[in-house]
């Protein structure tokens, strides 16, 4: 039997999908949905802070999203820019540490500067970590880690025989984070869309039909409750896993 004391996920990953459809249902432009999605993110971060989820990684812009209509991409960039100042202050007040993961060099210097500032401003915060994936792709992450490792090896600082999973992990975008326990995708699609491929090898997947702007703290609680009902076996038998879990 599972009880209320079942552990909370130590790290939740979320693919925040469905903004465009949410807006289209209201006969509004897709970017209206992205704006509404920001509000949803604010609520979910706050809720995680309140219930004690220590780390959240959200997919805000994928390396594939550059393929969207130019106008949507530039509106998204404007929204990020505007959100950064305001949200960074609020996150700081709530003791949240923000980090951006992804190939951020592709953004305008102004946006990069604001990201750096938000990271610096919140770098000492302890209560919760928020990682925002922008121009992120799981395959990009694996390739950039491999490139960095190869450079170390070529420079004679790392011998190829020493490379194992723990060392490889140090070169990925989330070297200090536990792997996500729970992966949530909103918007009804059941795919990974190149999110945290390396990190989610043993993560529990949860797909919600709710469009991201409709995804509320109650939806998150439902996802966590479902997570707590799952039995994670990590390759063991059920019996072994139950002994291991105590
Ligand atoms: C997710 O919502 C936000 C981004 C990818 C930036 P979508 O914009 O993908 O919304 P749908 O899937 O078209 O409804
Ligand atoms: C994934 O959503 C990326 C983000 C939520 C930022 P997409 O809407 O881009 O994914 P696909 O295109 O449906 O796979
Ligand atoms: Mg989508």
Image: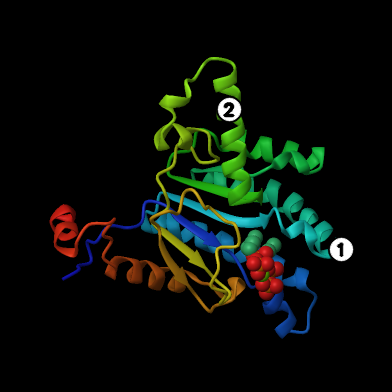
* Label 1 sits on residue: 71
In this rendering, position of residue 155 left or right of residue 235: right
Q: Count residues near mark 2 (Cα–Cα under 10 Å), then give few for <14, some for 14-19, many for 20+.
A: some
Secondary structure, mark 2, is helix
Mark 2 or mark 1: whose residue is earlier in sequence: 1
In this rendering, position of residue 79 left or right of residue 142: right
In this picture, is 165 found above or below 182? above
* Label 2 sits on residue: 150
Closer-to-camera residue (169/104): 169
**What is the quadrant of residue 25 in the picture?**
bottom right
User: Quadrant for ligand 2?
Assistant: bottom right
Q: Where is residue 7 in the image (x, y as percent from the top left)?
A: 27, 57
Q: Where is residue 243 in the image (x, y as percent from the top left)?
A: 12, 56
The residue lying at 51 percent from left, 72 percent from top is: 216
The residue lying at 57 percent from left, 74 percent from top is: 189
Closer-to-camera residue (11/147): 147
Can residue 15 be seen by looking at this rendering? yes
In this rendering, position of residue 76 left or right of residue 13: right
- Mark 1 CB lies closer than 8 A to ligand 1: no
Secondary structure, mark 1, is helix
Q: Residue furthest front?
A: 161
Closer-to-camera residue (91/61): 61
Q: What is the CA distance from the residue labelled 2 to the residue labelled 1? A: 38 Å
The residue lying at 40 percent from left, 70 percent from top is: 223
Which dot marks residue 95?
A: none
């Amino acid at each position: 039997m599972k009880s209320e004391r079942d552990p909370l996920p130590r790290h939740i990953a979320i693919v925040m999908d469905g903004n465009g459809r949410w807006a289209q249902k209201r006969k509004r432009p897709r970017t209206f949905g992205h704006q509404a999605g920001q509000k949803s993110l604010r609520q979910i971060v706050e809720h995680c802070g309140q219930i004690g989820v220590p780390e959240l990684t959200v997919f805000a812009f994928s390396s594939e999203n550059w393929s969207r209509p130019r106008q949507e991409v530039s509106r998204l960039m404007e929204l990020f820019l505007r959100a950064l100042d305001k949200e960074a202050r609020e996150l700081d007040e709530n003791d949240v540490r923000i980090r951006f993961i992804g190939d951020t060099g592709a953004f305008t210097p102004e946006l990069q500067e604001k990201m750096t500032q938000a990271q610096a401003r919140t770098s000492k915060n302890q209560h919760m970590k928020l990682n925002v994936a922008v121009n992120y792709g799981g395959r990009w992450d694996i390739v950039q880690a491999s490139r960095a490792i190869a450079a170390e090896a070529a420079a004679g600082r790392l011998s190829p025989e020493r490379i194992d999973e723990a060392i490889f992990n140090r070169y990925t975008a989330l070297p200090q984070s536990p792997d996500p326990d729970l992966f949530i995708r909103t918007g009804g699609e059941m795919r990974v869309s190149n999110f945290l491929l390396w990190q989610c090898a043993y993560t529990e997947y949860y797909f919600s039909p709710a469009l991201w702007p409709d995804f509320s703290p109650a939806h998150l609680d439902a996802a966590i409750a479902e997570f707590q009902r799952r039995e994670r076996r990590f390759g063991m038998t059920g019996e072994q896993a139950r002994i291991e879990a105590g």
